[in-house]
Amino acid sequence: MKFKRRSLIAVGGAAAALGIAAIHLAEQRRPRGKIVLRFSHVVDPDTPKGKAAELFKSSLTEATGGDVNVQIFPNSTLYKDKEELEALQLGSVELIAPSLGKLGPLGLRDFEMFDLPFLFNDYAALHRVTRGPVGVDLMERLTPRGLLGLAFWDNGFKQVSANKPLIMPADFRGLRMRIQASEVLDSQMRALGAIPDQMALSEVLPALAAGVVDGTENPPSNFLTQRMYTVQKFMTKSDHGYLGYVVIANERFWRELPGDIRSAAVAALKKASALADAIAQSENDSALDRIASMGTTKILALPDDAKRSWKEALAVTYSEFRRRRMGSHLLDAVAAATGASLLG
Ligand code: LMR
């Protein structure tokens, strides 16, 4: 190492030498074969995120000959929603993949943009945002918090459920609806006349069973695997909002990985991201079929006139968001990418 350092000073100057030496020292701190990468998430392994996480693990294990010991903790077994973000910042886990709006409480309110109702008509519109300059801009906002945004992973479009049919906004009046920790979702439920109740995913089933909340929203893959069909009599196929993920590493952990291991992790993540995005829609479609086949939750369509009423009621969520949260340049870029008509 001494030799390397001296020759670098000769070639590239002291600053470069110090930088590279720092990286080299950091690499020495992590002996090969002893790298543990803990990946905490809150959903079932049998979901788009769960399956992508497993592929990340098997790809990285194989590529490194087991030098990286990837440990996956699904279903909130290690940390719940808010805790996993804190754990990542503290270095108690190395990787998480929270849903996008859950970054809001960290002060990263712009990520709540993804929760805006009826913002994306389909995955293509979503990808124009996540895979374009807006996606890059959002990822950069993570760095000052010691976090490194690595990828967006798809899940799907949310449906609402309760023990009564939810068709017109008036049907929501007075219902307590579980939401993720997001001010946009809070505004959305209030605009529909419901009372929003933020809670971690792991608490939703018992809260629905006990009647602490009356209803909720999630893509079918989560509704099925969290067994919400056992406690909700009706689901409206509303597709009213999107739920997807950002894969985030503890920045220091990632930076200190030996270069070849980091490259292998990037490659493994690329495979996992491709899988998540490829299976998200079909997993949610088949989850919806399975929910229907259980016979405990009746699945209702949202007629066009009802959808128009939802959009009218929800316009206030957009104006609140524009006023409170976001640099309008970002919102304008999203509008341009999605062609969304609600961005008044
Ligand atoms: C939820 O809390 O409902 C979802 O964000 C869970 C998830 O990660 O899909």
Image (cartoon, helix red, strand yellow):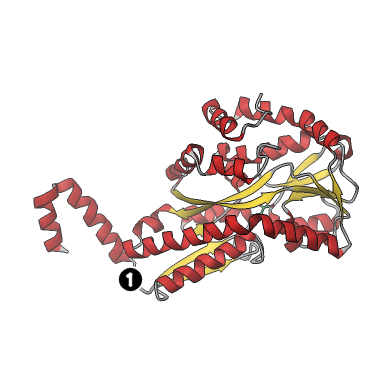
Picture residue at 76% right of the left edge, 41% below the top: 196
- Taking the view exactly as shown, the residue that stands out farthest to the right is 164
Nearest the viewer among 159 and 176 is: 159
Q: Position of residue 20 (x, y in %)?
A: 23, 54
**Mark 1 residue's CB less than 8 Å from ligand 1:** no
Q: Residue at x 18, y 46 (%)?
A: 15
The image quadrant that residue 110 belongs to is top right
The spot of residue 11 in percent (x, y) is: 11, 50
- Dot 1 lies on which element? loop
Q: Is residue 126 visible?
A: yes
Q: Is residue 174 visible?
A: no
Is residue 85 left or right of 176 when viewed as pictured?
Answer: left
Residue 306, compared with residue 40, is above or below; it is above
| Residue on which disc 1 sits | 31
**On the image, which quarter does residue 275 sit in?**
bottom right
Residue at the image position 85 percent from the left and 39 percent from the top: 303
Q: Within 10 Å of the Cα at label 1, are there few (<14), some (14-19), or many (20+) other Cα atoms? A: few
Q: Nearer the viewer, residue 286 or 7?
A: 286
The image shows residue 59, relative to residue 342, as above or below, that is below
Q: Amino acid at mark 1?
A: Pro
Quadrant position of the N terminus in the picture: bottom left
Instruction: Give how far across and how far down residue 320 sits, in percent.
Output: 67, 27
As rendered, which of 281 and 45 lies closer to the eye?
281
In percent of width and height, residue 337 lies at: 57, 34
Residue with the most extreme left position: 10
Compared to residue 301, the image places residue 316 above or below, namely above
The quarter of the picture where the C terminus appears is top right
Query: 153 and 186: which one is in front?
Result: 153
Total numbered labels: 1
